[in-house]
Amino acid sequence: MKKALLTLIAFHVLFLSCGQEKANIVIPIDMSSHRPVMDVMIDGKGPYNFIFDTGSTTNVIDENLQETFEFKVVGEDPLTTPGSKNQLFSKRVTVPKVNFPETSITQTAEMNVIALRKMLPVDGIIGGFFFEEYLVTMDYPSSKLILAKGQLDKNDPDVVPFIQDARTLNLTIDVAGHNAEAHLDSGNPLTMTLPHSLMDKLTFKEAPRKGEPMRTPVASFDTWEAQLLGDVTIGNAVIKNPHVRLAEGYKYVNIGYGVINQLRTTIDRKNSLIKFEKMTQTQGVNKVAKKDSGVPTSPYTGTYEGDRKIWIDDAGKLVYKRTPAPIPLEMVRVGVDLFEMKIPDGVRAPQEIPRVQFNRNSAEQIVSITLVYKDGRKDGPYKKIKT
């Protein structure tokens, strides 16, 4: 039996630089869920929505799509999540002619069948190893995955080696002075998840508060949310005082969207090398997803109870306005799904302006907002009633 290890926890800005050919392959991705979702054709049909997940060690197809195609079953695998002894047995099928629109890439792939759409609004997952013949760049602001031939220079000071442990990208990072093994997980839509065992060794801005349980198809983990007081060093890139999640049962650090999108990262699987470059992150929200009309959108936009409206303005800034208020306020990201509202210069606020915390359901969809005040008071949650 082929043993597959599936990491569905949860899902960076990458820049392709060293030793590449001029003919790059570009695959558009939708980053509105903070996961790279791309169009995939299967046997000439589609497109279907698949997540590109460097944290998954297997390809996945939703059981409903498998029922439509009835691909040949070639085996059964135990799927597990690090930190849990639970197993989920999944049929493995051969999926022919997996193709990405307007590219020359077409190949047959084995995929595990699970009830994925019960957890996420996608049809499948493409593991990070799928493109192992290429240098891979995930360019989040430009909403594209870039593939090129070539290799990284191991003598480049920004290049570090990694271990391809069960097809994941594992490397050693520094978390506020503590060495920790970590893996890069583009499928994690949040920030950085730390083992709970580090809680007593680290310093936080405030005592970690209990968070929502983190669920995978196999297991559930208790979590705590906090802002770290200290630097996280990944290669030569330094992330200062990041917001983190601590999870019981976790053995490794999981590096997700909230950290990756501050980096330019190039992955060279053939030589087990990875390059991290710190970039200047613009505050606010990336204009990465567009409706059919071409208007920028994001998972945060919509109307919430009480005539609270959130949208992206002509300057590409996320803004908030309640109907009685005279002006919209720019929203600036300060944590995991947490935003401050910025008062324009020269304007005096007659009362305290709260922060806005976006709340997600078990499928990681934004479903409501909570207004958070300095003294810990909270108003809401106000349900999202339309996008």
Image (cartoon, rainbow, N blue to C red):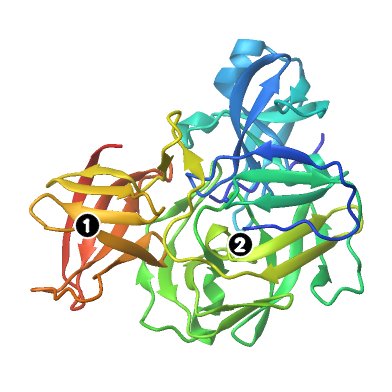
Query: Looking at the picture, how far across and down is residue 126, in whole percent?
Result: 69, 37
Height in image: 23 above or below 45? below
Q: Quadrant of the N terminus?
A: top right
Q: CA distance from mark 1 to mark 2?
A: 30 Å
Mark closer to the chain start, 1 or 2: 2
Q: Determine which of the numbered discs, if any, sits on residue 28 in the image.
A: none
Residue occupied by mark 1: 328
Q: As shown in the figure, which amino acid type bears the numbered disc 2?
A: Ile
Q: Is residue 94 in view from this perspective?
A: no
Residue drawn at point x = 57 percent, y = 65 percent: 259
The residue mark sitting in front, 1 or 2, is: 1
Q: As shown in the figure, which amino acid type bears the numbered disc 1?
A: Pro
Q: Quadrant of residue 90?
A: top right
Under circle 1, the secondary element is loop
Residue occupied by mark 2: 260
Left or right side of 151 for 290: left
Q: Quadrant of residue 299?
A: top left
Query: Looking at the picture, how far across and down is residue 66, in whole percent?
Result: 63, 18
Q: Is residue 245 in view from this perspective?
A: yes
Residue drawn at point x = 39 percent, y = 54 percent: 315
Query: Looking at the picture, how far across and down is residue 162, in whole percent?
Result: 81, 65
